[in-house]
């Protein structure tokens, strides 16, 4: 069983650490908890003890604790040290190498990877001191689950809210996974987009998201840290990854930008090519002389943009091509036009592939074209993930 050492530092978000413990335990990860003096103002040692099922460590100079497990041993007994929430104070202490309480001493003494999930007031997060501290920590290889943006307990608005526990768990699971794609970040887009026409109607397509979700799961199983950006689908969220839910192509575009940098991008979503300027009120049939016409405007091409050369271009960008005729020719053309590395091409002309459980594709890479026989979407996802693994080997 993998085990984390969870350091809970002080902050209103500390209550979310309890939910994190519950989720981690449910996912089969052992948790040893350390509570700082400030953390204890927000959650009790008793709650942490009840949820972890073990002793909660608080004091650097406790003879009882030291006789049970010395602090050096404690700092190394787990596979990963997680600080959630991490206050501006503890981040600064990590940078300076201070060791004036149990938490900071453990963070200094450990020989294991450290993951921090910061939470603080927006001004504190944006302060030059915190910016500089975060840069140093990232340079040292500390893993970071950045805070969310939103309304804060202090009444202000902006980045600084502790990331939600499932997102922190996803980062923990990725850090604990020793698979061949360990350390790689993969962005996967999946599902259709919905482009609203009015408050109740939208333009959409038949994509189910099954293929994209299966690819995200296959990459996570190989140890990649996955951000799945999904349009509206009726599938459950896969475990062990960050899932960002969007509706429109423009929202998907923003979410992909936000998730960069990445090593791998798999654009499996069936992104709508166009959107309309939605009407503020429901369009009425009664009383209008002629049916409304929809004026279409082009959506951003996420795949083409992410494939542009530049420092933020993922090392491997994979696009999908759903075609109803001249599959190989159209897909080869698409690969050249969009400048992605590989194209997975499927013929969607009425064979039950869109929305179905099976897929039959051509994989077009720089090295040539492979024709894959019809198989389940999960199997195909694993085969593609294996190809990605070989690419990085
Ligand atoms: O141009 P077309 O939609 O056929 O290209 C398909 C590929 O491009 C898919 O990988 C799809 O996810 C991606 N795409 C995109 N943004 C768009 C349109 C398509 O990322 N606006």
Image (cartoon, rainbow, N blue to C red):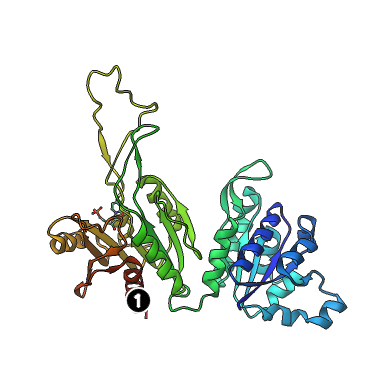
Q: Secondary structure at mark 1?
A: helix
Occupied quadrant, residue 49: bottom right
Give residue 80's position: percent from left, percent from top.
Answer: 62, 74
Give residue 308's position: percent from left, percent from top.
Answer: 30, 59
User: Residue at the spot x=66%, y=56% of the render?
Assistant: 16
Occupied quadrant, residue 393: bottom left
Q: Residues within 10 Å of mark 1 (few under 14, many from 20)?
A: some
Question: In screen coordinates, is 240 left or right of 92?
Answer: left
> What quarter of the picture does the N terminus occupy?
bottom right
Question: In screen coordinates, is 333 left or right of 68?
Answer: left
Q: Nearer the viewer, residue 84 or 371?
A: 371
Q: Nearer the viewer, residue 288 or 272?
A: 288
Is residue 133 something one can see in this rendering? no
Give residue 229's position: percent from left, percent from top.
Answer: 42, 55
User: Residue at the spot x=49%, y=60% of the render?
Assistant: 242
- Residue that carries the numbered disc 1 in the rendered image: 386
User: Residue at the spot x=19%, y=54% of the render?
Assistant: 350
Give residue 3's position: percent from left, percent from top.
Answer: 64, 75
Is residue 279 something one can see in this rendering? yes
């Amino acid at each position: 069983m993998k085990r984390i050492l969870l350091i809970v530092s002080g902050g209103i978000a500390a209550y979310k650490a309890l939910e994190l413990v519950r989720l981690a335990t449910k996912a089969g990860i052992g948790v040893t908890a350390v509570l700082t003096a400030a953390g204890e103002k927000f959650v009790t040692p008793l709650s942490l003890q009840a949820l972890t099922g073990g002793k909660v460590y608080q004091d650097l100079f406790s003879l009882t604790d030291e006789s049970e497990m010395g602090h050096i041993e404690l700092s190394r007994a787990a596979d990963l040290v997680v600080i959630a929430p991490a206050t501006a104070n503890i981040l600064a202490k990590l940078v300076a190498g201070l060791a004036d309480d149990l938490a900071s001493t453990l963070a200094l003494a450990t020989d294991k990877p450290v993951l921090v999930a910061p939470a603080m007031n927006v001004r504190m997060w944006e302060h030059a001191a915190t910016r500089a501290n975060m840069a140093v920590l990232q340079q040292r290889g500390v893993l970071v689950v950045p805070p969310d943006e939103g309304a804060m307990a202090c009444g202000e608005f902006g980045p600084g809210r502790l990331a939600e526990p499932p997102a922190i768990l996803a980062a923990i699971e990725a850090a604990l996974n020793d698979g061949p794609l360990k350390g790689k970040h993969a962005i996967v887009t999946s599902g259709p987009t919905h482009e609203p026409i009015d408050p109740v109607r939208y333009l959409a397509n038949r994509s189910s998201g099954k293929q994209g979700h299966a690819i995200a799961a296959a990459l996570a199983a190989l140890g990649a840290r996955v951000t799945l950006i999904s349009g509206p689908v009726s599938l459950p969220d896969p475990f062990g990854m960050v899932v960002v839910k969007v509706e429109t192509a423009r929202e998907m575009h923003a979410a992909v930008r936000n998730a960069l940098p990445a090593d791998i991008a798999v654009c499996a979503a069936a992104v709508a090519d166009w959107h309309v300027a939605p009407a503020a009120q429901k369009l009425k049939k009664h009383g209008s002389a002629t049916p409304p016409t929809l004026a279409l405007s082009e959506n951003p091409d996420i795949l083409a943009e992410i494939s542009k050369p530049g420092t933020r271009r993922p090392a491997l960008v994979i696009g999908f091509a759903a075609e109803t005729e001249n599959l190989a020719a159209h897909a080869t053309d698409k690969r050249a036009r969009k400048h992605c590395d590989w194209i997975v091409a499927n013929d969607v002309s009425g064979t039950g592939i869109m929305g179905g459980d099976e897929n039959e594709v051509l994989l077009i890479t720089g090295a040539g074209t492979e024709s894959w026989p019809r198989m389940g979407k999960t199997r195909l996802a694993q085969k593609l993930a294996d190809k990605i693994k070989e690419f990085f080997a």
